[in-house]
Amino acid sequence: MLREKTAVLHHMMVADRIVSLGLLAAGLSHHIRNSLVAVKTFLDLAPAKLQEEKLNLEELRNPSFGRSITRNVQSQVEKINDLLKDLWLASEKPPFQFADEVRLDQLVSEVLKKTKPAFDAKKSGSKTRSPATCRP
């Protein structure tokens, strides 16, 4: 009986940790995405601002470098953003709910009926106790 209680407590602790990790992942994802939005906005607006300053990109020593690095950084920002989106979705509740209702007392009694021959063969048995107030 003590082992069963310990096992249940252990499973509850693991479930609590998983929920905590999900909340942590959602929070981190949110804050990292906010920072990425600032970087992405800067990269999107930089060419227009350079034109406003009447700076001709073609007059720079290596004009293709600036365009290349900007495209590369934008691509990496999009990849990070997609990963964070996946992390955010994984931390949310699933969009479905289990509609099944299980009567635990009936399930246990069915399992015991099916396993009775194995118990009898080993000259073993089992007892079940469930509270009268157990609701479906």
Image (spheres, rainbow, N blue to C red):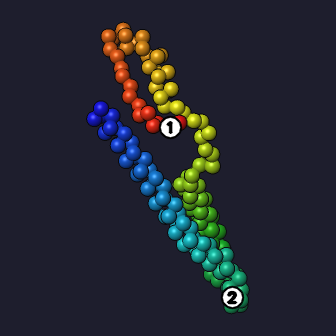
- Residue type of the residue flagged with mark 1: Arg
The quarter in which the N terminus is drawn is top left
- Residue nearest the observer in this picture, 70 or 25: 25
* Disc 1: CA contacts within 10 A as few (<14), some (14-19) or many (>=20): few
Q: Residue furthest front?
A: 132
Q: Residue furthest bottom?
A: 53
Residue 17 in view? yes
**SS of the residue under disc 1:** loop
Q: Position of residue 59 (x, y in %)?
A: 68, 85
Q: Residue furthest top?
A: 121
Residue that badge 1 annotates: 135
Q: Which of disc 1 and disc 2 is earlier in sequence? A: 2
- Residue nearest the observer in this picture, 10 or 41: 10
- Does residue 17 lie above or below 119 as drawn? below
Q: Position of residue 121 (x, y in %)?
A: 36, 8
Residue 83 in view? no
Tell me which residue sits at (28%, 35%) in the image.
2
Per the model, the C-alpha gap separating discs 2 and 1 is 75 Å
Residue that badge 2 annotates: 55
- Does residue 55 lie above or below 80 as drawn? below
- Residue nearest the observer in this picture, 49 or 3: 3
Tell me which residue sits at (43%, 16%) in the image.
115
Q: Position of residue 99 (x, y in %)?
A: 62, 39
Q: Position of residue 66 (x, y in %)?
A: 63, 76
Judged by depth in the image, the label closer to the viewer, 2 or 1, is 1
- Residue nearest the observer in this picture, 28 or 38: 28
- Does residue 71 lie above or below 103 as drawn? below
**SS of the residue under disc 2:** loop
